[in-house]
Image (tube, coloured by chain):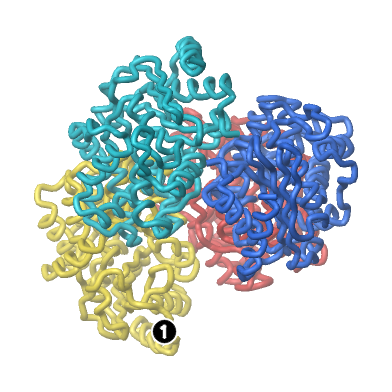
Chain colours: A yellow, B red, C cyan, D blue
């Protein structure tokens, strides 16, 4: 019951904070979402499950899905994957071309757009039917076969994705993209279009807190090593150029998306997902970050 | 005994790796140190103490001391300190003036040179006799009154510190330095000149694993909050533009210095210090990083 | 006869200089050209015409054609054109995305690739049949209806133009491209594929030395104002990040292309074109620059 | 009489333009100057002399003096001088440290602050009594022994010169400063403190239009080569990051200063100086640039 109470208290406090974020509007499908939604869900490694708000409502997880693509690529390819994408924080806004140009088309990490596009390209090389197989993989992580792409979001992204198109072309000019550019973009847009509820997202992230073992089946779906590495990268790179701030205030490995979701975990303890669509100027959920900051302070459950 | 054995096994493995680093030579006093030294010392939160190599030999801890200055400044000034220095990784080499110029003289974090100079300036404002009081503070953290400045290193630094002089002047032009520039530099050079052995350094870092409480006296010398925040900043910013790599390979909050030392901790578990003077191209101890990587892999004792 | 002698003397001297450039190889069609070619042709405003080397051999004028696109766009649109492209030197390599990103998609000048792509986009808006009408325009400037596109070069460019594709997509994301991206690129590649001999190129550039009036017909084909402005931009931006060097050594407004051509003029006096395919590391004809430097020193015919 | 009439007409037109610049305030001595002053003076190579406004009032020529230091250094040292300072436009604001750091302490050109500091350092190496000898040199160029330093401006600059101090320290760290830093700065501040009236400045610049020969004595005081080279550098680098704009609008080699002065010349024709203290956002005299733009348009006396 401790967790439920903490979630509720935190929820009440966050409701008092005046909203100062704005819903992402760069693609029409995201702009339609009501800014009023709020949800949080927490899963403990031992099976506890707690929530507040509209925890069962699906939303576009967007960049959070990048955690799953790099997990799959790293599982399949091992350390070879780091020859084409780094593990350093970028220190620059999330779709910056600057570093890419100075650093010969090798993106800083798999969570900036450029890095996730390279990872998408890697998966296109590794998988026979990437669209189907990735969905199968994510359903396995989630223990849930109702996870799906949202084709409307895919269409919306692909009509407005000029910066992403600039990124793949630039990386292609450095030979760091191997597949047809339109295929890479289409797969990437599909990945980002995945929808989950906070409950589903927290359950999926539990894998990272449990170092790769499913709660129900006790089946290993990711290597221990994969989970440790991905957690480490989330810690330093999960929040664009606000990664330091998140580490400082919240103190958990995590990842945010422009849909307003944030997923995080405390290795060996719990996973948590929050959702509130309005974003702060750095592109992370304004109330989501506040919630997690208050929650880890209250609970003293940061990793530090 | 588990820890002692792990240290020894790791030590043997690291000795097999061909040295590829080079000892820092930008100041003559550091260039004199033999590249052959190696030491590691580990302290558990319950009082265990384990070592290999020349763990009792003193060396220049250099930038590791920046952990202590920001700790003191944060204890005294609270969150106000973050108005003058950030908590984000820099993504650039450690004494880069570029970001400083783009970001109006506010350094990215307290561990790059510019940030540590601002913290030195803050301490000059807060303390009556900064040189003496800081030494007293660090001796208290260390539980050891034999910690001292090395005046030869101070002199050597001050004769070659043109880049640091450029940094304080640039920040002064943005009004982010308040004291006489020569005083700021002199205090900063003293801070970096502090010498410790691996044993002393690990014991001092134990404070951060124990969230502020001394092992022997059980006295609180730092607030819980301070330790959590400093650990978080070490995690994202402790290794210049290799912070992501260290987080990825080692998975502990830590800080390195150009003297070849690295100190790290696992909150609630242990602290560890290693020393090997030759540095990799990013300015971090080549064998020190290898040692910690192997050690946390073997022991499965990273925070992730 | 003075000019002929000067050309010949300079030619002999330049032949003594060991070649240190390399022929552009980023597209196969350019890589095929022999590095042995050399030609120079000079036209005076009064009708004199002098040459050395293979002055009648056609080559790909590449970026030199950007002088003609901005001339046409400026004639048609007037100062409005500068709302979408600047007139400042870039200080960076010729296809850098960095500045474009910092400066909201407005390229520094019409001679870097990004700027020329915007100018191509502007012409697509202004002309009914841009491909035909631009060819007509350039034939009028040249007084010569044998000027044509080289479709093999177009094809070669379009198969390797990933950086240019990155540029148009990036500018589209800032709304500084209005037409279909493939059309913009195709038109741009056609423009760059134009072929001329040194004789033809020098005759075309005579327009800029004669402030817009044709030598033979005395017909005005460009406004005085256009020629002055374009000459000014060539002076500060005509040689990528070597514009200062060219101004310093040669002292004429001019423009180079990766095909190894350079065209320049001395307002009220003469125009000159040189061609030697091997490029220096900055992308300008190695021997072409040497030739012009020696020629203007000998002749004391720089504008300064 | 043609020139006098043109100056007067232009003067009247410029008076109609609403002032939108602001007087430089970074040092108190400059901030004191009335924003109402306006003056212009033109000298022809044949001895004509024409003026409007307060052409005999002295003002701080500031960066315009950098033309004279590089002229002297180049006369004495020849092309060796370009090993320590470049001739390329910077594309960045005038005291940017960014490029300096990326380019190993070699400033882009002698007209940005970093470049002028290196030139000051070179002169300290070449001259026995730089303060006196430089004054003697400038008096010889000017044909006028009433040119002097303003010690109040020197004092004011030295009390606020933190960015310049940052620059010399940074270049010292790259070994591109050889003398005592305080001496370099003091000499530099003296150079910038020189005062001239528009009449004196135009007469001094006549040397550059006459390729080194004094009007009255017909004595050669600068080599032809020096004048050509300096004119070329003024053309591409004389107006900070507005050099292209000045070239485009005015079309003369010239140099501006934060005191509100601009000096320019048309080789073989005339020199001109204007003065109006309020600066545009790029740091160049707002009305001074307008005046020169209108003047060269009306007179058709640009070099292009």
Q: In the image, is D64 to the left or to the right of C39?
A: right
Q: Toward the viewer: B64 or A92?
A: A92
Name the spot of residue A118 as percent of width and height, x first: 27, 48
* Place of residue D122 in the rendered image (x, y in percent of width and height, measured from the top left): 75, 33
Residue B12 is situated, as x and y percent measured from the top left of the image, at 47, 34
Q: Quadrant of residue B127?
A: bottom right
> Which is nearer the eye, A41 or A131?
A131
* Nearest to the observer: residue C224 or residue A303: C224
Describe residue B18's horizontal placement relative to residue A138 as left or right.
right
Numbered disc 1: secondary structure: loop
- Residue A22 can be seen, yes or no: yes
* Label 1 Cα crowd, 10 Å radius (few <14 / some 14-19 / many 20+): some
Q: Position of residue A291 (x, y in %)?
A: 40, 79
Report which residue position mark 1 lands on.
A19
| Residue B60 visible in image | no
Tell me which corner region of the image, top left, top right, bottom left or bottom right, holds residue A10: bottom left
Q: Nearer the viewer, residue D63 or D179?
A: D63
Q: Is residue C112 above or below residue C252?
A: below
Q: Residue B176 vs residue A66: left or right?
A: right
Chain of the residue on which disc 1 is drawn: A
């Amino acid at each position: 019951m401790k967790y439920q109470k903490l979630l509720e208290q935190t929820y009440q406090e966050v409701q008092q904070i005046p909203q100062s974020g704005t819903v992402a509007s760069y693609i029409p499908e995201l702009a339609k979402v009501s800014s009023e939604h709020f949800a949080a869900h927490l899963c403990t490694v031992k099976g506890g499950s707690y929530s507040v708000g509209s925890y069962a409502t699906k939303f576009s997880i967007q960049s959070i899905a990048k955690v799953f693509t790099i997990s799959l690529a790293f599982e399949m390819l091992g350390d070879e994957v780091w020859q084409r994408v780094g593990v350093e924080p970028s220190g620059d806004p999330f779709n910056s071309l600057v570093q890419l140009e100075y650093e010969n088309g090798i993106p800083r990490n798999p969570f900036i757009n450029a890095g996730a596009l390279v990872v998408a390209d890697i998966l296109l090389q590794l998988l026979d039917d990437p669209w189907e197989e990735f969905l199968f993989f994510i359903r396995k992580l989630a223990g849930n076969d109702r996870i799906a792409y949202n084709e409307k979001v895919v269409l919306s992204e692909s009509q407005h994705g000029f910066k992403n198109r600039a990124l793949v072309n630039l990386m292609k000019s450095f030979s760091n993209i191997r597949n047809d550019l339109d295929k890479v973009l289409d797969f990437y847009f599909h990945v980002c279009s995945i929808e989950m509820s906070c409950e589903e997202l927290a359950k999926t992230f539990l894998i990272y807190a449990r170092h790769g073992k499913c709660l129900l089946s006790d089946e290993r779906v990711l290597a221990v090593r994969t989970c440790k590495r991905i957690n480490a990268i989330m810690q330093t790179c999960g929040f664009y150029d606000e990664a330091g701030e998140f580490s400082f205030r919240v103190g958990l490995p995590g990842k945010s998306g422009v849909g307003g979701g944030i997923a995080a975990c405390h290795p060996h303890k719990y996973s948590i997902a929050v959702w509130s669509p309005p974003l702060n100027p750095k592109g992370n959920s304004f109330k989501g970050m506040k919630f997690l900051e208050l929650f880890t302070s209250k609970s003293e459950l940061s990793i530090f």
